[in-house]
Amino acid sequence: MALIKGFCILLLCQFLGEVTGRALLLPVPGPVLGMLFLLLGLMLRGRLRKRLLPAPDIEGEGVLRVDENTDRDLGQRQLARALLRERVPASLRLASNGLLSHLSLLFVPAGVGVMVHFELIARDLTAIAITLVASIAVTQFVTAWLLQRLIDRGSATPSGAGGKSPSADEVSS
């Protein structure tokens, strides 16, 4: 049952992506939009999780952040806490791990397509090679430029304003 629930979540996100892409005439494939919807859903779930699950206090025990009316909706909070205990729902994890374990099979149609249309690819091999090399070069250039900008911005921040880099102890914890 959990596997079916996980696949239903994945298919629902893909369906929402397809509908959104076609309704808004976006040049983005529906499954890509579906992955964005899934990501947004998991991020929203994470925010709810942070608000409803106990936050550790100094002694390491949990403290539930609630307002003055704690008795009124305690049952609802306990239910929400139980549902949000895991970062990724177990059913979604089960379905996605099943798909990922057979990911290589999903590349078979693309490989067959390359073999079937090899003559077409061979005709345009020079253009394909130039495009691949140029796109790799542009990607590396933009990545290096962006990284340098981020490094420069980090070093320009005064150490008193939070620009201090974490020590090894802070990183490991």
Image (spheres, helix red, strand yellow):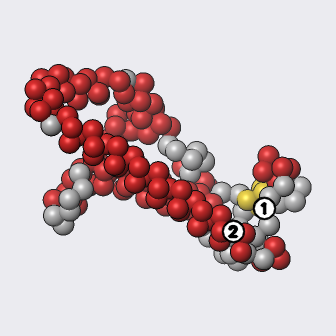
Locate residue 26, reporting x and y percent: 20, 62
Q: Are marks 2 and 1 in contact (CB under 8 Å)?
A: yes
**Mark 2 highlights which residue?**
154
Locate residue 2, reporting x and y percent: 42, 33
Residue nearest the viewer, comparing 138 with 64: 138
Query: Residue at the location (65% across, 57% down)?
Result: 53
Of labels 2 and 1, earlier in sequence is: 2
* Picture quarter with the N terminus: top left
Looking at the image, residue 164 sits to the left or right of residue 143; the answer is: right
- Residue 26, compared with residue 10, is above or below; it is below
Locate residue 17, reporting x and y percent: 26, 54
Distance from Cα at disc 2 to Cα at disc 1: 9 Å
Query: Residue at the location (77% across, 72% down)?
Result: 162
Query: Residue at the location (36% across, 56% down)?
Result: 37
Residue nearest the viewer, comparing 61 with 71: 61
Q: How many marks?
A: 2
- Residue 74, compared with residue 107, is above or below; it is below
Residue at disc 1, secondary structure: loop
